[in-house]
Image (tube, coloured by chain):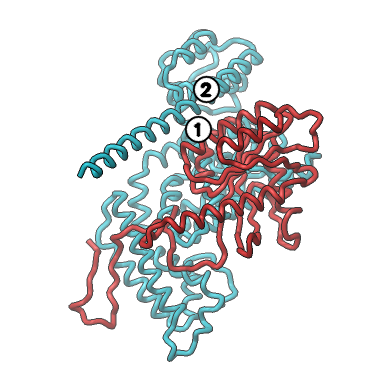
Amino acid sequence: MGSLPLKNAASCKTYLHSLSQGEAAVLRAEALARTMLGCQPTDQAYHDWVADSVLDVRMQLEQCLLSPSASRSDVAQSRGHEGKVPLALESVLMSVLHAPVMQSLVTLHAQADATIHKQAKTHCYAGSKTLDSSLARLSGAEELLIGMDLSHASAALQRIDTECSCPLEMICAIAEADRRLADSAGRLRQSSDSEQAVSADDLLSTTIAAVIVAKPERLVSCLEYLKLFHSTGDWSGKTGFQVATLEAAAAYIEQLNRAFSTFSASGPAPRHSQEFMQALLEEDEPLTFANSSYALRMQAQHTSSPIQVPGPHKDKSASDLRYGHGMSLKQLIGEELMQRAASLQRTASLQRAASLHRTASGKLRAHTELTGAD
Amino acid sequence: MGKQDASVSRAKQKAKFVLLGEGRVGKTSLVSRIIHNIFNDSQQATVQAAFASKTLEIDREQVEVAFWDTAGQERFHSLAPLYYRDADAALLVYDITDKHAFQQVQRWVKELQTMVGAITLTILGNKCDMVKQQAVSEEEARGYAESIGAEHHYVSAKSGAGIDAAVQQSVQRLLQRRASQAQHRPPSYLPGRRQGGLVIADPEQPASKRQSACC
């Protein structure tokens, strides 16, 4: 049993049962986890308290299992189990807490979850499981990846949302999605003459596409759950990278939503591309500017193939948008605006961060002076 | 990022290295080189080059280094903090034939200094096999690296030149920084742990001594 990989809460329980004192540890873990279910307020403090408690309980039970008393003379038990016992205990504890904690997180992150689900539904046809040209443009995937099979990766991402009952199961599903995407992209790269390995750009863009195809209903909540409760995770290693890529995909889709919202909320569509440009260039807030310009580019692309893209403007016809200039001009405008927007966005984020830093330094100085005066 | 587990003592140190730089400067190729050529060849290569992990022995210390590649496309720039958060070191890559790519490195440095703070910086001038088309002078590159307390190395993902030394020296500097931080750290320091979890009662103890923090 010790050599079998841990894949889910059930296999973790079986594994712990195989250890000396393991059965008692499982019972104790489940009992302690149930005591944490006494109240479930929907706030971050409750989640932090549960996360701390799970960690404390796990560490105590770990000591019981990995450092048995000398009289038992089964010290050998600890050999080879140091890596597995913490993960197994965490899974058993979290399988008891999973449903109520997730419910609480879903209430907290309902808006972000709904945004991603809505955007995914907007950009993907029902039943579409491959990377088509429209999805590739949206996600930033290279042309040679068009036609890539996303069915397995999106199915794995759907499982995170619907079937998992502990952090380990979620991590396994994310790892499978990552592996499937890397395999598919790798095959396409090999079949073309490209010698380049699958890059971070490939992985992120295809993850974005897979999330859109999967249309998860609770992705942000699931990611928050993992970050809070997967204390045994290798966060600076592969697990951390895979979760970061999925987080980046979720953040990108949220940005798309803001871009389209800004575009839709800006009132009647301008009559000419010059008016679009003027409206965007007069925008003071760089992030809004960036999002608006991206929306403009997407609109330009979508208008050229209205049948392919069921975007947020699907209730508007091309003539309503009055965007009748040639495609090359639209592309030029889009590219120009995107470059300027990205530059402004970077400047703004750095300025904000610098401002925060200055405020913090000021407070620190004031505090030092105050304590010095005392 | 999850709760830190202070109970498990690790013989091997861990380090997170993030690769940053403009698109097409050769970040992915560098990671590929690191996986396939630089270190122990018997270690299994990953299918993709977006992430790689290798164990190095530096100054008789085992260090497991995780290399995180980042997407170079401009549209993904705002997502970079998700990758470089908690990074121990950054490998900032530019193409020596591209002046703009070097300017982008300077932009990344500013961002890291603002957002991350203490991080070991190493600037890598890639494609050093194309020295005839060099657009960034050695003097400028080294001068800039020195001004920000970073090291500068010329590397070639194509030939593999310089990568080994650059990574090894970067890990060495990281270990020195960690050792220095450990000396100045208060003894009670316990990373990432907050107080206030469940107080676990020992079932062997009398009931009067048990406590519970459960609300």
Question: What chain is the red one?
Answer: B
Question: Mark 1 — residue?
Answer: A122
Secondary structure of the residue carrying numbered label 1: helix
Q: Can residue A130 be seen by looking at this rendering?
A: no
**Left-right relation of A213 to B156:** left
Secondary structure of the residue carrying numbered label 2: helix
Q: Residue A4's x, y, as percent?
A: 59, 72
Q: Residue at x 48, y 67 (%)?
A: A87
| Above or below, B96 relative to B198 | above
Q: Quadrant of residue B3?
A: bottom left
What amino acid type is highlighted by mark number 2?
Ala
What is the chain identity of the residue bearing mark 1? A
What is the chain identity of the residue bearing mark 2? A
Disc on res. B131: none
Judge the density around disc 2: few (<14), some (14-19), many (≥20) Cα neighbours within 10 Å. many
Q: Can residue A176 be seen by looking at this rendering?
A: yes
For the residues labelled 2 and 1, the Cα–Cα distance comes to 24 Å
| Above or below, A163 relative to B49 | below
What amino acid type is highlighted by mark number 1?
Thr
Disc on res. A341: 2
Q: Residue B15's x, y, as percent?
A: 56, 54
First in sequence: mark 2 vs mark 1: 1
Q: Are marks 2 and 1 in contact (CB under 8 Å)?
A: no
Judge the density around disc 1: few (<14), some (14-19), many (≥20) Cα neighbours within 10 Å. some
Labels 2, 1: one chain: yes
Question: What chain is the cyan one?
Answer: A
Q: Residue at x 36, y 69 (%)?
A: A57
Q: Residue at x 68, y 49 (%)?
A: B48
Q: Quadrant of residue A310?
A: top right
Q: Residue B36's x, y, as percent?
A: 75, 53
